[in-house]
Amino acid sequence: MREPLRAESDRAGTPSLAPSLRVFVHLATDKDAAAWRRAWQAGTLVGVNEETPYGYGRAERMGCTLAFSRAFPEKPAVRFLRLGLRVLAGFDLLHALRQGRALREADVVWTHTESQFLAVAAALAFRAQRPQLIGQSVWLFDRWERLGPLHRMLYRRLIRDVDVLTVHSTENLAVARALFPGKRVLHVPFGIPSERITPPVRRPGRPLRVLALGSDRHRDWACLAAALDGVPEASAIILSGTAPRRLARGRPNLRVGRARSQAELAAHFAEASVVCVPLKPNRHASGITVIQEAVLAGLPVVATATGGLEGYFGPDAVRYVPPGDPAALRAALLEIAADPEAARARAERAQARMIEAGIGAETYIRRHVEISREMLDR
């Protein structure tokens, strides 16, 4: 039996008797916690979510006092300046500087991507007393080799002030440890709220209804479109804010659109035969959020074997194909159509894996709490 997907040095149980930790969660401006809560309550927040961004609010039940970064009203000129600096530096410094008081009052700062941890490190660079900083990276190590020398020098300097680097995949873990051998780098698997599970049922293989979604920069929509060519018994809908609509031209079995509400997305899941996650080569487990959503919905998944996804779900749980191979992707989709019962069984194994390995927001947030207490020796 495969071992549970635990982060490095993971411990069972939830901290409850230790002193309260003052945690500041620094997120991007468009992840303002108050706006997130309003969208969640209105049902316009698409995906498996909860009241606080990425489930970080769960930390309050684990002995933490939380504060979230705030988005501030901006005049057009100020917004232009902030975004211009973000493009030049690669992180949003002004947004971090605006959180000054909350940063000063925190014991530890959590971040969600490199854009946030680099900004916080820069904002705290000249302070004698500073909170501990967990720098979570997603895309940085994918593009490190393509960075210019000035950005590399700046980022290396800022990473010196990051107390712990965390990543979502073992591939990123290896790269980060090679680049920063003196830095503590930990693998913290990402997870979404996983308490609500729909048991898999046998879905009709024909007509085959393929659902693909996501806006990550490493989606390979062209590969999926090519895989559908010459397969009239299959149809697909891509729900994405980044997929080019031109892909659907001349392809009557392909639609490109967006889900505007959680109810609309749930309807798409209910109608689908399979969820497809086509990916370009990457190191950061691109697509893992959509895969977890599909598994919770009881759907079989076909995905590209890249980015460390197999560390979350093995080939017995997800049908993997090599990158950039439309023929292999087409064959995998046709397997679903030919044997719906085998697809149902694979979806069942994926759900079992998710439960047994503890893949979900609860484990993800608990690991942040544990790392924080280790850093502060509490």
Image (cartoon, rainbow, N blue to C red):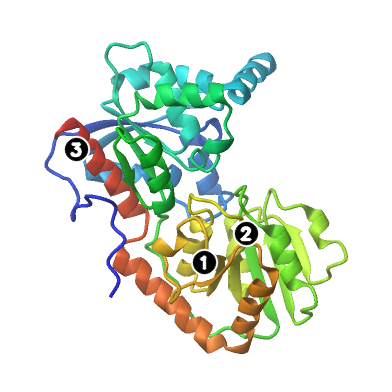
Q: Which amino acid does label 3 sit on?
A: Glu
Dot 1 lies on which element?
helix
User: Is residue 190 at least partly visible in the picture?
Assistant: no
Mark 3, mark 1: which one is toward the viewer?
Answer: 3
- CA distance for labels 2 and 1: 10 Å
Could you tell whether 58 is left or right of 41 in the image? left
Label 2: how many Cα within 10 Å (few below 14, some 14–19, many 20+): many
- Residue named by callout 1: 294
Quick check: 366 above or below 220?
Answer: above
Label 3: how many Cα within 10 Å (few below 14, some 14–19, many 20+): few
- CA distance for labels 2 and 3: 37 Å
Mark drawn on residue 213:
2
Residue at screen point 52% across, 82% down: 343
Mark drawn on residue 374:
3
Residue at screen point 42% across, 55% down: 192
Toward the left, the furthest residue is: 17
Name which quarter of the figure residue 66 lies in.
Answer: top left
The image position of residue 359, as x and y in percent, is: 36, 60
- CA distance for labels 3 and 1: 34 Å
Mark 2, mark 3: which one is toward the viewer?
Answer: 3
Dot 2 lies on which element?
strand
The image position of residue 233, as x and y in percent, is: 75, 82
Q: Label 3 near label 2: C-beta < 8 Å? A: no
Q: Which of marks 2 and 1 is nearer the N terminus?
A: 2
Task: Compare residues 294 and 337 and report the one nearer the observer.
Answer: 337
Name which quarter of the figure residue 178 lies in.
Answer: top left
Dot 3 lies on which element?
helix
From the image, which quarter does the N terminus lie in?
A: bottom left
